[in-house]
Image (cartoon, grey):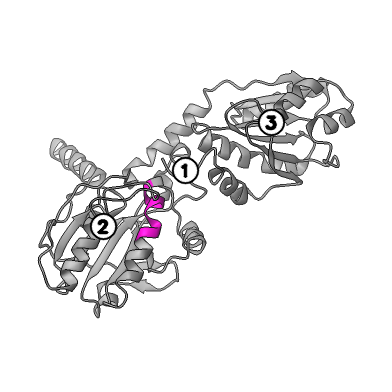
Amino acid sequence: MLVLFVFAASIHVLHAEQPETLKIGAQAPDFNLTGIDGKKYTLKTFAASPVLAIVFTCNHCPTAQAYEERIKKLTSDFKASKVAVVAISSNDPKAIRLDELGYTDLSDTYEEMKVRAKDMAYNFPYLFDGDDQKTALAYGPVATPHIFIFDKDRKLQYNGRIDDVEKPSGTPKNTDARNAIEALVAGKPVPVPTTKTFGCSMKWISKEHGVQDEQAAWAKEPVTLESIDEAGLKELIQNKSDKLRLINVWATWCGPCVTEFPDFMTMHHIYRQRDFEFISISADNPDKKPKALKFLQGKFASNKNYIFSVEDKYKLIEAVDPKWQGALPYTLLVEPGGKIVYAKQGPIDPHQMKKLIVENKYVGRYY
């Protein structure tokens, strides 16, 4: 009995990793999901539409972001034909590692879905399935985005990609989803019913352990704190690297600095695999270096960390930025070549900063 239980449990895990994708001709599984407008949506919500297109997508995936405008265009182009387009985010937010968010300013929580929909002026319903993923398990999307198109009887007539070009600036040769909708509106067979789909893998609930694994790995990374003088600070600001550089001046005695430092660690862990680096500069007195290092170690600050080598804080201010009035914290975002694109005295807005980073030309939202 124990062997049978273990076998059954392993089959369930495999199923959760990638359920079978709905077959052409299958009836659309019903759902009962909450949209970003707070309303409940089911298949009956779209009963008046002769064609229903369901797109499994999300906030964070670069491929999903690359297709947002095209999903909006499908919605508007077929509005007169009463075609219904609906997007569903089924990713489990608790299963998304920070290093999987390198192309976005938002993860896939319900609240963040609202932000993204507003930022991009979505013209279609955006529904959340990330709590239990029942809808995704019933439909079997392989990646984000993955589109399923149903006829008036809600029989599946197309599933796969939207088109064959990921980058928004490219011109697709095969507009498979559009072709399918046009055929169904005209009462004709869909020319190509099934295609493969390219994008980010689904973040199934079974992947939640990856977040814990990631955090455990941070604890093993070395944390250092080096002394730096005026010349070194000026060179940091000049940014002779090829990376977008985020610089934060802080101190252990500064309450707002200590409070917001974890936000910088989040950005470090999100964007460090991109053309980006975070550098911290401690304004503590040189003799407080052990205290500053202990603080950094507690935050898993494996980025570059410096402490100003002299006690004269006015030399620190002038070396970092003559426009800085001297209050902590102080944050700069510097492009390669030394162009300062952001400077803020006082605490930052973490979401605004992530947006500035990912929308900067040296980083970007797409591959």
Q: Return the residue at label 3.
A: 280
Point out the tag, 1 or 2, that comes first from the N-terminus. 1
- Report, in whole angstroms, how far the alpha carbon at label 1 lies from the one at label 3: 22 Å
Quickly name the residue at label 2: 147
Residue to which mark 1 is pinned: 103
In the rendered structure, which segment of residues is drawn in magenta? Answer: 63-70
* Amino acid at pointer 1: Tyr
From mark 2 to mark 3, how far is it between C-alphas? 44 Å
Q: Secondary structure at mark 3?
A: strand
Q: Position of residue 322 (x, y in %)?
A: 84, 36
Viewer-proximal residue among 173 and 252: 173
Bin the neighbour count of mark 1 within 10 Å (Cα to Cα): few under 14, some 14-19, many 20 and up. Answer: many
Q: Is residue 118 above or below residue 270?
A: below
Q: Is residue 226 above or below residue 252?
A: above
Decide whether residue 209 is among the magenta residues: no
Helix, strand or loop under label 1: loop
**Mark count:** 3
Kindly indicate whether the residue at mark 3 contacts the one at mark 1 (C-beta within 8 angstroms): no
For image coordinates 36% across by 54% down, the residue present is 67
* Residue 236 seen in this snapshot: yes
Residue 86 in percent (x, y) is at 32, 66
Q: Amino acid at mark 3?
A: Ser
Circle 2: element type: strand
Closer mark to the observer between disc 1 and disc 3: 1
Vertical comparison of 9 with 319: above or below: below
Q: Quadrant of residue 81?
A: bottom left
